[in-house]
Image (spheres, rainbow, N blue to C red):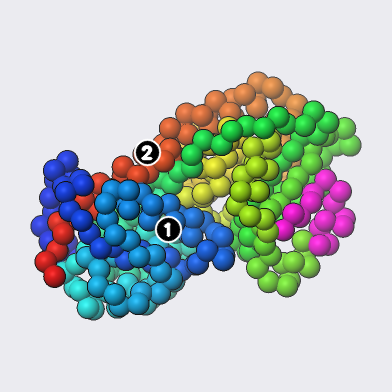
Amino acid sequence: MVRSTAVSRIVSASNALHCFFMHIALITPYGPQQRNGNWHTAARWARFLREAGHGVRTQVEWDGHEADLMIALHARRSHAAIRAFADRYPSRPLIVVLTGTDLYRDIRTDAAAQHSLELAHRLVVLQERGIDALGPRLTGNTRVIYQSSPDIERSPARDDLFEVLAIGHLREEKDPFRLALATALLPDASRIQAVHLGRALGDEMAASAERAQASLPRWHWGGEAPHGAVLKHLSHARLLVLSSLMEGGANVICEALAADVPVLASDIPGNRGMLGDDYPGYFPVGDERRLARLLLRAETDAVFYSGLRDHARVRRALMRPEQEASRLRQLVAEFEHPAA
């Protein structure tokens, strides 16, 4: 079970916030070259913690450098660092952040991920439904921290087409070709054009993307692009589509809402935790026909599109940088600076 003893006494967040300088080891399984959600989360959190006065070392593997506290993203992939820190500093706080593959696959079947849960003093989930995937004995030491994005200024959308965007590396968990298949079901009169931005993780995925692009004129694979270019593209898109099989709390939803772009999302707990149960833009996992109907409705029904946008604007309040920074700093402030 999550370790509730052998830690420094818990202090009031209101009194401890900003009171203790801590050396923090921040572990992410992916470096900046991968440009994925874990890396962006780690970079953002490092900035928030440094602004609060803490010292932060961001690493893919823990180098053994002394730290007062460790924050590790991904229970399975960061297990070696989690175990090493717990072995060396059993009384020092250890926070494990659970990703989508952690919550909805690995903690059920993978021994390393399960061991990370046992070693953690706190668990973090990235959306409100994430707690549902944990047993009752873990929920008391679990915190919800929504990810965030600063406002993204809108650019004028093109009048001659209705641009739909998908963002993310091409891998099985993302069901990356569901949008491509949906575009084949649209009527000839539709102005929808879809673009997918993201690197193919493997030759087979790349070959599939090339075949889809050659046979589906409404779908274009843009490949990997710098983050700034992705956000610029997002700023003039009409919709974002997220078709994932599992998500822990998608960064791209935060960015879409920051750009005032509504989302059509697969109906999975991780997306419901981000967008809310009453959001009108869900489609069943793997169902390109339902997705195609939603796409066409968003293009042609102004009332429906406005409803998507209004719901998204309400959820946007949860995903602002000041909210994420505050929740993260409060979590760290639950622990006194431990004695060396």
Q: Which residues are magenta?
A: 210-223
Work out whether 104 lies above or below 19. below
Q: From the image, which quarter does the C terminus lie in?
A: bottom left
How far from the left and from the top, in percent, is residue 61? 40, 74
How far from the left and from the top, in percent, is residue 158? 77, 32
Q: Amino acid at mark 1?
A: Ala
Which mark, by number, is residue 14?
none
The local secondary structure at tag 1 comes to: helix
Give the residue displayed 16% in from the left and 59% down from the top: 337
Crowding at label 1, few (<14), some or many (≥20) Cα neighbours within 10 Å? many
On whether residue 211 falls in the magenta region, the answer is yes
> Disc 1 marks which residue?
42
Q: From the image, which quarter does the N terminus lie in?
A: bottom left
Give the residue displayed 41% in from the left and 41% down from the top: 321
Task: Compute the Cα span from label 2 to label 1.
Answer: 16 Å
Q: Amino acid at mark 2?
A: Glu
> Disc 2 marks which residue?
322
Is any atom of residue 130 visible in this view? no
Give the residue displayed 33% in from the left and 61% down from the top: 56
| Apparent side of residue 157 relative to residue 320 in the rendered image (left or right) | right
Work out whether 190 lies above or below 209. above
